[in-house]
Amino acid sequence: MEQLYWLDRIQAKDTALVGEKAQLLSQLGQQNHPIVPGFAFPAPKLWEFIERVGQSEPLLADLTDSSLYVDVDDREALRSLAKRIRTALLATEFPPDWLSNIVAAIGKWKSPALIVRPSLSRLGGDKGSFKGLLRSRICAPEPESLQFALKWVWAELFRAGSLFCFARASYHLKSLHLALLVQPIQDAIASGTVDIANGKARVRAVWGLGHSWVRGEVKPDDYQVSLSADEKSNPKIIRRSGNHSLIYRLRQSPNFDTADNFLLVERPTSEQQQTVCLDEASLAQLTRLVREILAQNSAICSLEWTLVNTPFPEDAAVYEQPQFYLTQCSTRYTTMPLVVDKLNSSAPDALAKATILRGIAASPGRAIAPAYCWADSQLPPNLPPGQILVATAITPEWLPLLGKAAGIIAERGGTTCHAAIIARELGVPAIVGVNNVMGEVEMGETISMDGTFGEIHREVSPSPPSPSTSSASPPSPPSPPRFPIATQLLLNLSQTRSLPEAAALPVDGVGLLRSELTIVALLDSQPLSWWLEDTQKKNFVKRLGKEIAEFARHFAPRPVFYRSADWRSPEFSDRIPSSSTGSNPILGRRGTFNYTLDATLFEAELTAFAEVQASGYSNLKLILPFVRGIEEFIFCRDRVRQFGLARHPNFELWIMAEVPSVCFLLPEYVKAGVQGISIGTNDLTQLLLGVDREQADLVQLFDERHPAILNAIAQLIEQARIAGIPCSICGQAPVLYPQIIDRLVEWGITAISVEPSAVEQTYWTIARAEQRLLLEAARRR
């Protein structure tokens, strides 16, 4: 089939047609090293397809002869352009002969799934690293699923972030040749990488498929192997055992709706938890393979591998033991031949591939900028704008600085820590839980980070980088919705600096105004107790009232739900008295129970709230946090009435439904005066599952999709419906797992509150869920 390039036949001259990834892997295969078989759909086919798309999309009619002209610094225009191109590309059908040839080619593979990988080649020199910019796609071995996957990977070239990075690197689109590498997938015993430098190999391994590590959900086993030892002797091994709490397997009978349906998550056996992924024999086998490759290809610096029980379909050999196969490789010279000769062996070390670090993806977006490393727990004296802030931990007093950063990286924290929350609100990419990042990254070193996938690596371009090329920025309003939705879409906010962009979004109001993050920004490095003294309290109330009024003004007449202070985290220890949290800040004297012990702050908040109401704003509503019992609610209710807040007709008093006891006592709360509930999935999950959500090493156990969590949410929604009160949800679950929204809408949730960056995604997910319910109802008639 002339339009396909099989990995066992690709030549060096074919690089522009098949891309570097396919060409390098093919060369290893032709040297008799074990590679996963496959073929490349050549790069020119993309531009033939673009011409076909251009027949219905005028924007692309002359793209093959010119280029796209857009100001990449105009975020709204860039996103609109990217969305228009991708929609047209995905909607256009392949020519019949293309699809028939590809389907015939995969017929020899008896695999339950395929993977389509981008294989890029760049003409005109190397101006920067684009590793991880274009993503792969898993699909079914059947025509429609495969066609969609091929088009989806092509469409990666036209994402807003991709167009931004290519423009910053001064690449004309026509100089980017994107081929598609199609390969079968098999279930794996283990997967991992090998990074090679200075006669040593650093091997990392996880059980099963590599998705658990890529997604930052586990810590891999880490081995250091000496490659200079006598090949006949055992390699010298330095081993550090990882943390394997979940395993990704290939589902044998998947549904083909989404790529995630091909993956099955399992808990490791007790034996797997107690042993390393690669024993001495397997590690020696992998080391021999690496040595053999380096003997023929001295420029290799990185390999990705999979360990399987069953040979891949095109492999004629039959193995009595598990076999390693190579899935990808990289060299020091991304646009040079794999085998290094004397003419290029003295290339500068600056071109060496950087070591990749991985952490927990906390806020989406990409950034390339110098690192500003700060190991002290005290506030950095000066953070230059446009640099990536790298720290051991981000404390609340740092929050005003985060808007200046191109990105945020921290060794500690989880997806629900305050640094991650603020980063998502401001549109700044963030990665947390990065082991030893302070030891790996140096001050002023240019690094790139991907907050969507939790990846960090050093930039290897020999030319000086620009100060910052972040593709993340404060969110811009998405395209207006095509039709109204019945489920309210609300925002989670805390910072007034994000108000102009946030208020312009097509939302129904603010579902969660996090007061403690607003208050911290007002403290001016003074402890809260100082502000609550008699001489300062009036000034504090005035400041707080001004902040609340800003939210009310920007969103009027849309509602703003203000959640009173909940000092739950040790992050606040420098600003609040230790007595406010107790020895266990996650379960200590937090929430409304703390109000019953000392109501000073709560009453200051109510005073500020009343002053804002008195100034004419009638769209404010109050949510009480972490309510443990009816008595606590009654105490707060009575204080609210004393301050006159309930006299305003639009005022409502809600509670957070995050302590599990609310699931059993909601009717009693409603009798006591609760007018609505907001489900906080973050606390509800950690309390029901017994998992501290701030511990990075436990992140894989913190799963809002757990049956116990979903059952509790369904029960709360049903009880709220019976009681006749509204029920909102404001945790991270709907953003991290959009598939949950289908169930929420079906169960009767009245509102979903998310960060600004997730508005567009959440809107369309709600719209599809509502349309499916209507369609199902119509079919039942």
Image (cartoon, rainbow, N blue to C red):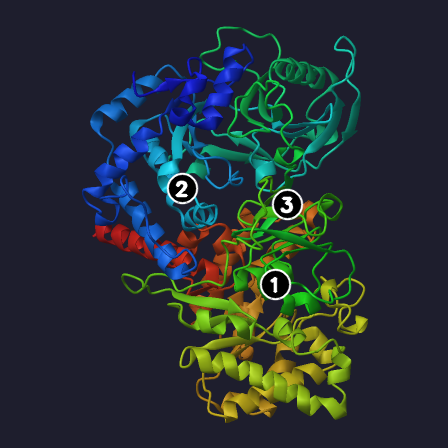
Residue 385 numbered mark, or none? 1
User: Residue at image x 59%, y 59%?
Assistant: 386
Secondary structure at numbered mark 2? helix
Q: Is residue 743 left or right of residue 321?
A: left
Q: Circle 3 — which element?
A: loop
Residue 359's label in the rendered image is 3
Cα distance, mark 1 to mark 2?
29 Å
In the picture, which quadrant includes the N terminus? top left
Amino acid type at image mark 2: Glu
In percent of the image, x 38 and y 55: which residue is there?
79
Q: At 42% from the left edge and 43% from the top edge, which residue is drawn?
A: 171
Q: Residue at x 64, y 55 (%)?
A: 686
Of the two numbered discs 1 and 3 on the same chain, state the one appearing first in sequence: 3
In the image, taking residue 24 as reference, residue 568 lies left or right, namely right
Tell me where residue 461 appears, x and y as whole percent: 57, 40
* Residue 726: percent from left, percent from top: 44, 70
Farthest residue toward the front? 343
From this view, report whether residue 673 is shown above or below residue 768.
Answer: below
State the separation of the CA atoms marked 1 and 3: 24 Å
10 Å neighbourhood of mark 3: few (<14), some, or many (≥20)?
Answer: many
The label nearer to you, 1 versus 3, is 1
- Element class at badge 1: loop
Write down the residue under mark 2: 156
Q: Nearer the viewer, residue 64 or 727?
A: 64
Sequence-wise, the earlier of marks 1 and 2 is 2
Dot 3 amino acid type: Gly
